[in-house]
Amino acid sequence: MAVGIIGAFNELPHAAEPPEAALRLQRLPPSSFPLGQAGSPEAMDSSLYAQASLARFTSSASAVTESRSSLAHQAGRVAVLVDRTPARVLWSSEGLQIQIADELKVSEVIFMQASPEAIEPEHFEVFAIPGLSMIFLQEPANVQRPQAACRFEGQPSTRRTPYVSLIRSLIENDQISRARSMLNALPEEVMIQSQVRALSRVLAVPKVSTTEIKDIDRGREYQWLEEHEYQYRGQWVAVDGDKLVLSAGSLKELLDGLKRLNLRMRPLIHRFG
Amino acid sequence: MLQLSGAAFTVGRSRFVDQLPGWGEATSKIYVKVQPDEWPGAILAQLDTGAAWSVFDTEIAGAIGVLAAAGEIVELDTRFGRKRGRLQRVGVTILADEGESLNVEATIFVCPDWPPGKNFLGYNGLLERIRIALDPPAYLFYFGPVQ
């Protein structure tokens, strides 16, 4: 198999591929994951893909199937598959250092110069890892990779990276500090893209300040809620002190009613189960 | 308020409850008072450092205008299974009975099929910048901004 191995992975051993059963993978037809569907996140990202980065993991599948430490991505059919090891390895992509995970290594990374649309399904088998919502492509052993696929060996150049998808993938895998690190490392020309700005906004650390808004001890309201929970099952209630202000079957109804009452004090609003 | 090495550690405190009235929870949890922006009163939300993001009841999200707003679409693993929703920036006030309340420009997860009545204050985008302390016998929740 022709592969391009870059940077830190040059010296990694080429481990034997595990039997498929051990991977607990589910084989899926390529048509299950059409790219660039209108309105989908994939479609939003498609402009960012000049190249798909493919990877293949070659050792114990348990790291992938039993932990959330692997990073793979459906959008653009980008996959980074990882293997457990004590080593700390960084994946370098277009000058960007991405720390996959302290305890993980990428066993082999294949870069392929192609748009996602150019990935021919017959050259790859598409798998999903049950329960992890991860999808990756694996090159069948009998497929000869075209020479162009090796073009970037050791020398990534003008290819583009699916930043948005990678950051979103990190968010979905609850790796927020890594998503923030990646966002902070983005080149300026990427930062101005609207999708990146939107990500930047929601990933920003919360801003906290003191405020004049003051509440009161709601001990009496808590007591009231406890005493009346059976009486108002399934309802929204507004309570002030030990008195019910209003109850309603829907929040909208309750809020409309509160607006009409024009209360001086803000009530405690609660929904009973 | 609480001090650490002579400096303020928290600026406000409020009384919490350890059972959410009307929901028959089997175990005790910490429910504190908050007030989302554009909301006319206090609500109870579970203090949940194990939750990745904060989430509000869908009707509350609708009432404060974030349910239909644009935001970053993500799919997250939650205690109620895999959920698709949007990450949104929202103002949330952590209400104090004594001392000062905190206004947090937070990121919350807005999910259209979130179970009713379940409000959570999660770590990312909200609790990660707040100092907290609990006095369980007194049912007191202390909080302050990370300096």
Image (tube, rainbow, N blue to C red):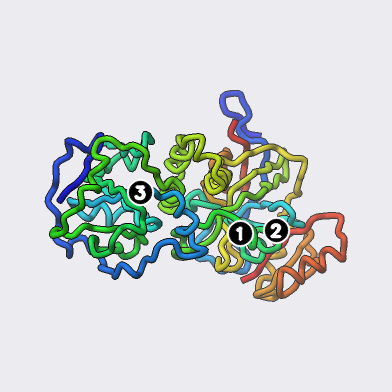
Q: Quadrant of residue A211?
A: top right
- Residue A74, image x and y in percent? 37, 58
The amino acid pointed to by label 2 is Ile
- Judging by the rendered image, the residue that carries numbered circle 2 is B64
| Camera-nearest residue between B115 and B24 | B115
Circle 2 residues within 10 Å: few <14, some 14–19, many ≥20: some
Q: Which residue is drawn at 70% across and 47% down?
A: B95
Look at the numbered disc 3 and give the secondary structure of its residue.
Answer: loop
Tags 1 and 3 on a common chain: no
Tell me what residue is drawn at x 31 percent, y 39 percent: A91
Kind of element beneath mark 2: loop
Q: Can you say whether A5 is above or below B59 in the image?
A: above
Q: Is residue A218 left or right of B17 when viewed as pictured?
A: right
- Of the numbered discs in the image, which one, if any, rests on residue A51? 3
Q: Identify residue type, mark 3.
A: Gln
Locate the C terminus of chain A and report the quarter of the image it occupies: bottom right
Residue B138 x %, y %: 62, 47
Which numbered marker is on residue B56?
1
Horizontal relation, residue B54 to residue B80: left or right: right
